[in-house]
């Protein structure tokens, strides 16, 4: 089995694969102060509750945007799964041509998403990842990673509003009945959800205008299911794109996927 681990700013999402089949996946809170042993105990408990044993894990791959946790998870995998993980960076062979001015600045999650989406769709793409930050990545049919956009995530925007406006209370990020709110909670929900959907659509359209052609627009990330129904530009949600991309890149590193993505 393969353990695929995506370390994000808010959550650590990890799953186990048998071949290319995702058997199970879990979401943990990101805690930069947690030790390898703390995460190891959590992961082993989840694994054994699913009826699997740690010795069944024969490989691992890690994507991380939290540098302080990268080595923590490398150590955890080595200790608890007895294997050395592959750590995703711009230096590994992804099948993409990175056109970014400094490829080392690209978040590993963006690289993984781009590789997975290119392999799956093989057409001009815009990938929108709704995480702590919302990222937009442009990938050509030929596999060129052109760059993209980084915007504050919906959760960050909500937290900033509540922190700076003393009289506004936190509300659930759900769809209000109307755009014109008739109470404070509905007004906040409308501003956050519909306003954020407008931000997404505007950025996608500007990217397509700059590219000079339409793209197939896909979404992933924890908040995708909340925002996407209110957008007009996103065509598909790929909820597990990052985990699938990690599994794909691991197989590629093992020589089990064609270098030409055929």
Image (spheres, helix red, strand yellow):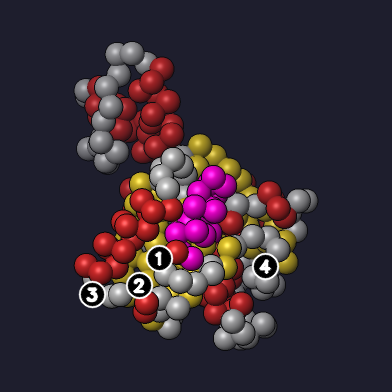
- Cα separation, mark 2 vs mark 4, equals 26 Å
Element carrying mark 4: loop
Which dot, 2 or 4, sits closer to the camera?
Answer: 2
The kind of secondary structure element at disc 3 is loop
x 67%, y 83%: residue: 260
Query: Is 163 situated above or below 175?
Result: above
Q: Are marks 1 and 2 in contact (CB under 8 Å)?
A: yes
In percent of width and height, residue 64 lies at 53, 54
- Between the C-alphas of marks 1 and 3, the distance is 16 Å
Q: In this picture, is 69 found above or below 218? A: above
Q: Which mark is residue 80?
A: 1
Q: Earlier in the sequence, mark 4 or mark 1?
A: 1
Residue at mark 2: 54
Q: If the image is split into quadrants, where does the C terminus sit?
A: bottom right
Up-down relation of residue 98 to residue 178 (above or below): below
- Do tag 2 and tag 3 residues touch (Cβ < 8 Å)? no
Residue bearing mark 3: 51
Q: Tag 3 or tag 1, which sits nearer the N-term?
A: 3
Q: Is 247 in the magenta?
A: no
Q: Which residues are magenta?
A: 63-78
Q: Residues within 10 Å of mark 3 (few under 14, many from 20)?
A: few
User: Which residue is nearer to you in this view: 186 or 214?
Assistant: 186
Q: Which residue is mark 4?
A: 92
Instruction: Say which quarter of the image contains residue 166.
Output: top left
What kind of element bears circle 1? helix
Q: Is residue 200 visible?
A: no
Answer with mark 1 or mark 2, whichever residue precedes in sequence. 2
Mark before the other along the chain sequence, 4 or 3: 3
- Decide: is 30 above or below 99: above
């Amino acid at each position: 089995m393969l353990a695929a681990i995506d370390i994000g700013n808010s959550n650590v999402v990890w799953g186990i694969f048998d071949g290319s089949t995702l058997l199970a996946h879990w979401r943990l809170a990101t805690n930069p102060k947690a030790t390898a042993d703390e995460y190891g105990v959590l992961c082993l408990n989840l694994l054994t509750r699913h009826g699997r044993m740690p010795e069944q894990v024969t490989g691992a791959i890690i994507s991380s945007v939290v540098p302080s946790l990268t080595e923590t998870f490398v150590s955890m995998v080595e200790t608890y799964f007895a294997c050395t993980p592959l750590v995703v960076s711009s230096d590994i062979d992804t099948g993409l041509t990175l056109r970014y001015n400094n490829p080392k600045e690209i978040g590993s999650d963006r690289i993984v998403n781009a590789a997975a989406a290119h392999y799956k769709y093989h057409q001009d793409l815009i990938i929108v990842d709704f995480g702590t930050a919302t990222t937009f990545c442009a990938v050509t049919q030929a596999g060129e990673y052109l760059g993209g956009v980084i915007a504050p995530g919906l959760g960050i925007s909500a937290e900033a509003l509540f922190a700076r406006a003393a009289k506004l209370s936190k509300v659930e990020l759900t769809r209000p009945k109307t755009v014109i709110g008739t109470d404070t909670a509905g007004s906040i929900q409308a501003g956050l959800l519909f306003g954020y959907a407008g931000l997404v659509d505007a950025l996608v359209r500007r990217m397509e205008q700059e590219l000079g052609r339409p793209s197939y627009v896909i979404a992933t990330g924890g908040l995708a299911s909340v925002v996407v129904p209110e957008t007009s530009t996103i065509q598909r949600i790929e909820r597990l794109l990052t985990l699938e991309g990690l599994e794909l890149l691991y197989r590629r590193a093992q020589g089990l996927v064609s270098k030409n993505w055929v």
